[in-house]
Amino acid sequence: MMNKVFSAEQLDSKDPIRHKRELFSLPENTVYLDGNSLGPLPKAAELRAREVVNEQWGRDLITSWNKHEWISLPSKVGDQIGALVGAKSGQVICCDSISVNLFKVLSAALKMQPHRKVIATTKDNFPTDLYMVQGLIELLGDDYRLEYIDEHNIEASLNDEIAVLMLTQVNFRSGNKINMKDVTALAHKHGILTLWDLAHSAGAFPVELDDAHVDFAVGCTYKYLNGGPGSPAFIYVAERHQQRYKQPLAGWMGHAAPFAFEPDYQPAQSIKQNLSGTPGVIGMSILSAALEAFDDVSLKALDEKSKKLQTFFICEAKRAGVWDAFDFASPVIDNRGSQIALKHKDAYAICQAWIAQGVIADFRAPDILRIGFAPLYLRFVDIEYAVAQLSLIIEERQYEDPAFKQKHHVT
Ligand SMILES: *Cc1c(COP(=O)(O)O)cnc(C)c1O
């Protein structure tokens, strides 16, 4: 057995961002390794929910659109998110879901490339990303096609027929992380526009959209950004494209002058064009408060802590002798996001047995136990406990209990 250099308690006491955990309302006796799927409840979000429902909606009614500036929430929250993904203000707006936003951006990007008909992406991209392309191509007709490229050999797959390269920066199963700056530069050499999905990036590590010259990006806010279930997503359109950009879901909120109520659509010449209908004020207000957890902490510090937590997990698992029960299905630490994937034929039942011991991770079909390391609130002692439980589950073959094999709707 290897000896520990530092105990979990020592690592926690040396953690420069340990105070951030207090900002969250976490259930007792739970180790939450699923913040990459649904972030936990920030205390500020809970307070804001009450305020927006009781005081703003309940008392101030429709005057709140001005009085509490509901009308500028999408831009304000967009800029809050922008600060976390390296976008200077006026380029990010908060609206709708990733799925709907992909439709808008893909449509607009194809229009900007009238002589090209190919959208390129990876086959194991998140399904909704693929489905949105498939739906759009069906609408646009046979000239258009979806082309799958190799995530591990992107350069060789690029050519001058591709209109848009749509990539998710961090693979949702394996955690494989693509070098955004290099790949964007390679795509631009071929005249390809880039669209990055930041679902597993935003709030987990530094993302530099402006610096990488990214054209477009989308992302959700209920994962590492802790905005709550179904909280609104975001869109980034680089400033240089905003004049030519025209998305087809032309709604009144994206009009240049929504309150002129004119019969003809005139798009806003700004990121606001992406607004289609009335924003979900309650969810967006809650999200705005949740994002305050990122005040006074750098994404670099979060990334560093995530890497330490991951390394500690792996060391502990090796020390406990449980590591060899799994096949490691993630790349090396510098090439992955804030998660690791462990393969096991009984991964589903193992995950359920872990949950029964208060450790929440998730399962991705067919055989992956997916473990998220959200650095704002996880402690090293949590990781120590999680590994000890995992070790018992494997040693005692607890996963063979039929109760843990029963499939639920949501995994
Ligand atoms: C979570 C996730 C989504 C979710 O899309 P919604 O429209 O918000 O449901 C999309 N893409 C990726 C890569 C994801 O990980």
Image (spheres, helix red, strand yellow):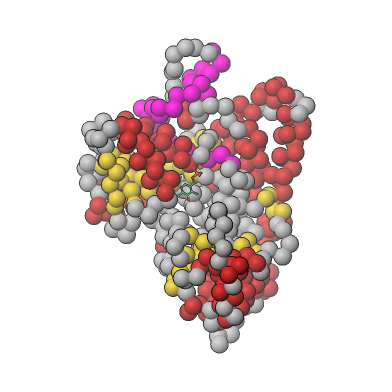
Residue 348 appears in the picture as rendered = yes
Residue farthest toward the bottom in the current orientation of the protein: 1
Q: Residue at x 57, y 27 (%)?
A: 278
x then y, percent, for residue 70: 64, 28
Find out whether residue 251 is within the magenta segment.
Answer: yes
- Horizontal arrangement in the rendering, residue 395 relative to residue 120 (left or right): right
Q: Is residue 284 above or below residue 197?
A: above
Q: The N terminus appears in which quarter of the rendering?
A: bottom right
Q: Residue at x 48, y 60 (%)?
A: 364
x then y, percent, for residue 14: 65, 69
Q: Residue at x 34, y 53 (%)?
A: 123
Question: 17 and 194: which one is in front?
Answer: 194
Residue 210 appears in the picture as rendered = no
Q: Is residue 317 above or below residue 21?
A: below
Q: Is residue 32 above or below residue 345?
A: above
Question: 136 and 336: which one is in front?
Answer: 136
Q: Quadrant of residue 227?
A: top right
- Range of the magenta residues? 231-260
Find out whether residue 237 is within the magenta segment.
Answer: yes
Q: The C terminus appears in which quarter of the rendering?
A: bottom right
